[in-house]
Amino acid sequence: SRLVGFFGDYMKQGGFPEYLQTGKDEYLKSLYDNILYRDIIVRHNVRSDRAMRLVANFAASNVGKEISFNGLRKMVGLSNPVTVRDYFHFLEDSYLVFLLPRYSDSLKKQIYFNKKVYFIDPKLAELVGFRFSEDRGRMLENLVFLHLRRFHSDLYFHREKRECDFIVRERNRTEQAIQVCWQLDGTNRKRELAGLSEAMDMYELSEGLILTYRQETTLDLEGRQVTIMPVWKWLLEYQGLVQDI
């Protein structure tokens, strides 16, 4: 229960040390503004401060969602989707925002497919983004992405008829398919399992993983094993600490 509590604190407060010491939102907002202005707008000679800030705020507001450069171009008032792509590259270079490509055997298709967007810190995303309601599942997915990125450079999401949140590849082979949801229940069970099953079929995987906030069990999916595990425990396993629990 203490570990779950600590993990809940991380989801709410993020991981910036000075913010955790002071609890001052002004510190994170100032840090964000400094990165946007000094590391992006000035460094890259961005002509439209407003458009750059709108793109960054859009990213913070749409964690875990697919984005279209062309659609966002119209929203922020830019004339060329290439400019929006460049803005996201600037955000990635500053480690504020990360884009996850959709997997395809064709590199050309990977380039032109929509990307999914993730943010460097949950509390910072909350402060600078805008949401009509709390989307805990998306924020949980964001934390999983950040951790996967620490250990893997070849990451994608899967989308054909269904979607699977993360595809992990090593040495040109898909090693793992991962779904993330706050809780697996009657409202989403069919969708989550269908997306995972499609990915497992396509990449010839005998095991799949669903990460949730607290649930833990295993399922048999047409003769293949699906492990359901709390994200906090999965995080500890990745760091070799689970034996200490």
Image (cartoon, rainbow, N blue to C red):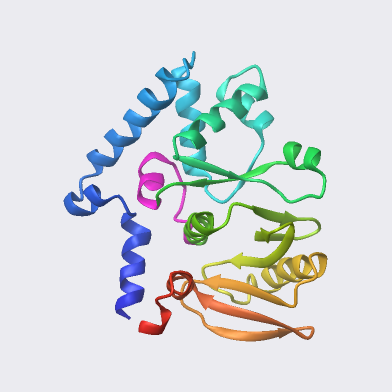
Q: Residue at x 58, y 75 (%)?
A: 184
Q: Residue at x 41, y 84 (%)?
A: 243
The span shown in magenta is 122-136
Q: Is residue 126 magenta?
A: yes
Can you tell which quarter of the image residue 10 is in? Answer: bottom left
In the shown orientation, is residue 155 left or right of residue 201?
left
Residues 175 and 158: in front is 175
Point out residue 192 in the picture as x, y percentages from the top left corner.
Answer: 67, 69
Q: Is residue 245 visible?
A: no
Residues 125 and 168: in front is 168
Point out residue 35 in the picture as x, y percentages from the top left corner.
Answer: 36, 31
Q: Is residue 191 magenta?
A: no
Q: Where is 86 relative to 145, above or below?
A: above
Q: Where is 6 relative to 12, above or below?
A: below
Point out residue 59 in the picture as x, y percentages from the top left corner.
Answer: 51, 39
Q: Is residue 29 visible?
A: yes
Point out residue 102 in the picture as x, y percentages from the top left corner.
Answer: 71, 49
Residues 201 and 187: in front is 201
Q: Quadrant of the N terminus?
A: bottom left
